[in-house]
């Protein structure tokens, strides 16, 4: 839980806080790994890996042939370790025989954007809880990063023309650039479009004495950024 996020989802008219992964299903998977792993395979451990796009649990030993993970709601039960399983049952770690896979399946229904996969890898059994929205989250992060970069650029330009109007060349030189870049031109156009700056000679945009000055809207924008 230290390595996964907790977010909020809307259920009806209420906003409910919950983990980004089905924690009960992951806990049950780890519990199954401890109970059903093949302890004769020395030098191997149960591994729980948390990646950006998934949580993966790997257990030494293959799946018992009598268990079918594709039929998770059928309450299957097949005990491999005849000592550990009954002890877990008496300790209350196992609630009911054959209930584990159904518990996982039931909680997954509440997480439609989490895909459940299982496979056998070598002499190990592996289960994955995969975030289907991971790519969208990456794209959103990039967009937010760009917006933050834009906001920084906007504020720097506004601060430079706060007290005195400047030309394109003046602004470029204020950033340590000898030539006016396409990026600066696009940024100035966006600032004009958003009415954060304005031309000192609005009737002739290409006038040789043309300058840019901050608007009242731009001054308010700067104050908001400070907050």
Image (cartoon, grey):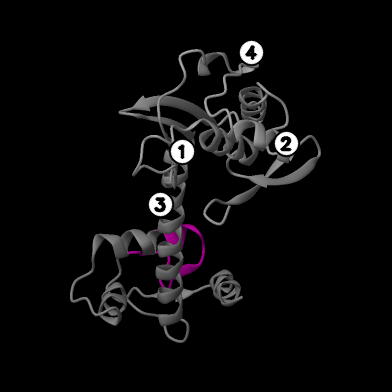
The image quadrant of residue 65 is top left
Q: Give the mark, 4 or 1, whose residue is nearer the N terminus.
A: 1
Q: Point out residue 208 in the picture as x, y percentages from the top left corner.
A: 27, 73
Residue drawn at (66%, 37%) of the image:
88
In the displayed image of the protein, which residue is found farthest to the left? 178
Quadrant where the image shows the C terminus: bottom right
Q: Position of residue 91 (x, y in %)?
A: 72, 40
Decide: few, some or many residues near mark 2? Use Cα within 10 Å; few <14, some 14-19, many ≥20. few
Toward which corner of the image does residue 156 lie, by quadrant?
Answer: bottom left
Residue position for label 1: 57
Q: Which residues are magenta?
A: 190-205
Rendering coords of residue 174 (x, y %):
30, 81
Q: Which residue is mark 4?
A: 74
Residue 205 vs residue 57: left or right?
A: left
- From the viewer's perspective, tell me whether residue 75 is left or right of residue 198: right
Q: Which residue is mark 2?
A: 90
Between the residue at mark 4 and the residue at mark 3, the CA separation in whole angstroms equals 43 Å
- The first of marks 4 and 3 along the sequence is 4
Answer with mark 3 or mark 2, whichever residue precedes in sequence.
2
């Amino acid at each position: 839980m230290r390595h996964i996020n907790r977010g909020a989802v809307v259920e009806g008219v209420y906003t409910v806080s919950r983990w980004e992964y089905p924690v009960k299903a992951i806990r049950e998977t780890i519990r199954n790994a401890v109970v059903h792993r093949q302890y004769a395979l020395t030098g191997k451990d149960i591994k729980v890996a948390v990646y950006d796009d998934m949580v993966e649990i790997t257990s030494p030993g293959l799946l018992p042939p009598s268990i079918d993970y594709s039929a998770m709601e059928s309450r299957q039960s097949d005990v491999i370790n005849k000592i550990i399983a009954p002890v877990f049952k008496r300790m209350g770690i196992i609630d009911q025989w054959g209930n584990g896979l159904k518990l996982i399946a039931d909680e997954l229904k509440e997480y439609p954007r989490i895909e459940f996969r299982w496979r056998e890898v070598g002499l190990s059994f592996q289960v994955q809880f995969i975030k289907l929205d991971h790519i969208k989250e990456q794209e959103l992060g990039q967009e937010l990063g760009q917006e933050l970069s834009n906001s920084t650029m906007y504020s720097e330009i506004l601060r430079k023309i706060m007290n005195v109007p400047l030309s394109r060349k003046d602004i470029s030189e204020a950033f340590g650039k000898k030539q006016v870049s396409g990026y600066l031109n696009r940024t100035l156009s966006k600032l004009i479009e958003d009415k954060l700056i304005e031309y000192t000679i609005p009737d002739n945009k290409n006038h040789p004495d043309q300058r840019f000055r901050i608007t009242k809207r731009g001054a308010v924008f700067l104050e908001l950024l400070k907050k």
